[in-house]
Image (cartoon, rainbow, N blue to C red):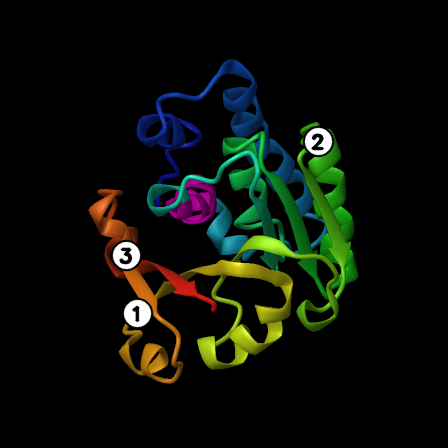
């Protein structure tokens, strides 16, 4: 069984966290272990590597893009709250809106947001195509192939907005399927754990 280093792995790579942020990251482990016994927020077998595979992976986005207070971020297909909740902890002055079409998961995400007192995060049960509002960024974790995802979310982005996706594996064919400019970043350039050897962050420009 893989050993989960716990929140210390977050503190190792993000050493400028204040005490409130650190406490929130510590609380995440307990909250997700508790809720995941009631509803399958994330794969049960993945809980043994929760901080590495979910929390740190989500924060990989922060290694290529530091959100500003004026930015607004839409997390599409958030599922159990990833990558939105870890990013909302890391960027407390940036507004995050987490959406998913599965009501049971969104209900728990809402409970977690309130428990952590994340006043910069909201959530909603809605499909990506139906969401209102304009956002600086859309973030997601392997929701769909880019040629399906981009038409779902383009209407939600401001002019010059970008989509940032966490994905893995060989993405050359998927990137060729879209006409947008796609910048690819290897997470192994930022995190030393073998888990990240095949993990990437894609940043897609929307005209």
The reply to whether dot 1 and dot 3 touch (C-beta < 8 Å) is: no
Choose between 33 and 90: the one closer to the eye: 90
Please report whichever mark, 2 or 3, sits nearer to the chain's N-terminal start: 2
Read off the residue under disc 2: 119
Tell whether position 130 is magenta. no
Read off the residue under disc 1: 169
Q: Which residue corresponds to the image point at 60% horizontal and 32% vertical from the top-left?
A: 30
> Residue 35: where, in percent of width, then height?
69, 43
Choose between 175 and 186: the one closer to the eye: 175
Q: In 3D space, how far apart are the residues under numbered discs 1 and 2 (Cα atoms)?
A: 35 Å
Q: Secondary structure at mark 2?
A: loop
User: How would you rate the neighbour count of disc 3 (Cα within 10 Å): few for under 14, some for 14-19, many for 20 or more?
Assistant: some
> Residue 102: where, in percent of width, then height?
73, 64
* Left or right of 127 on screen, residue 53: left
Looking at the picture, does residue 107 appear above or below residue 207?
above
The part of the chain drawn in magenta is: 48-61
Main SS class of the magenta portion in the image:
helix
Q: Secondary structure at mark 1?
A: loop
User: How would you rate the neighbour count of disc 2 (Cα within 10 Å): few for under 14, some for 14-19, many for 20 or more?
Assistant: some
Q: Nearer the viewer, mark 1 or mark 3?
A: 3
Q: Which residue corresponds to the image point at 32% horizontal and 31% vertical from the top-left?
A: 13
Q: Nearer the viewer, mark 1 or mark 2?
A: 2
> Residue 135: where, in percent of width, then height?
61, 54
* Left or right of 128 on screen, residue 71: left
Choose between 88 and 183: the one closer to the eye: 183
Tell whether position 54 is magenta. yes
The reply to whether dot 2 and dot 3 touch (C-beta < 8 Å) is: no
Q: Which residue corresponds to the image point at 44% horizontal and 29% vertical from the top-left?
A: 7
Q: Which residue corresponds to the image point at 71% horizontal and 57% vertical from the top-left?
A: 133
Read off the residue under disc 3: 185
Please report whichever mark, 1 or 3, sits nearer to the chain's N-terminal start: 1
Choose between 176 and 100: the one closer to the eye: 176
């Amino acid at each position: 069984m893989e050993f989960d280093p716990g929140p210390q792995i977050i503190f190792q790579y993000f050493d400028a966290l204040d005490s409130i942020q650190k406490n929130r990251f510590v609380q995440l482990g307990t909250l997700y272990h508790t809720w995941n016994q009631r509803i399958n927020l994330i794969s049960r077998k993945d809980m043994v590597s929760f901080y590495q595979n979910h929390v740190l992976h989500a924060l990989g986005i922060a290694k290529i893009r530091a959100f500003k207070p004026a930015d607004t971020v839409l997390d599409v297909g958030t599922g159990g709250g990833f990558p939105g909740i870890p990013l909302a902890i890391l960027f407390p002055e940036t507004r995050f809106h987490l959406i998913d079409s599965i009501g049971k998961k969104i209900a728990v995400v809402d409970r977690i947001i309130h428990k952590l007192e994340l006043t910069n995060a909201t959530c909603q049960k809605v499909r990506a195509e139906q969401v209102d509002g304009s956002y600086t960024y859309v973030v997601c974790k392997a929701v769909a192939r880019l040629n399906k995802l981009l038409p779902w979310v383009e209407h939600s982005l401001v002019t010059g907005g970008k989509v940032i996706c966490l994905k893995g594996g060989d993405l050359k064919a998927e990137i060729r399927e879209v006409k947008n400019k796609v910048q690819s970043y290897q997470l192994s350039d930022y995190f030393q754990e073998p888990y990240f050897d095949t993990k990437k962050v894609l940043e897609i420009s929307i005209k």
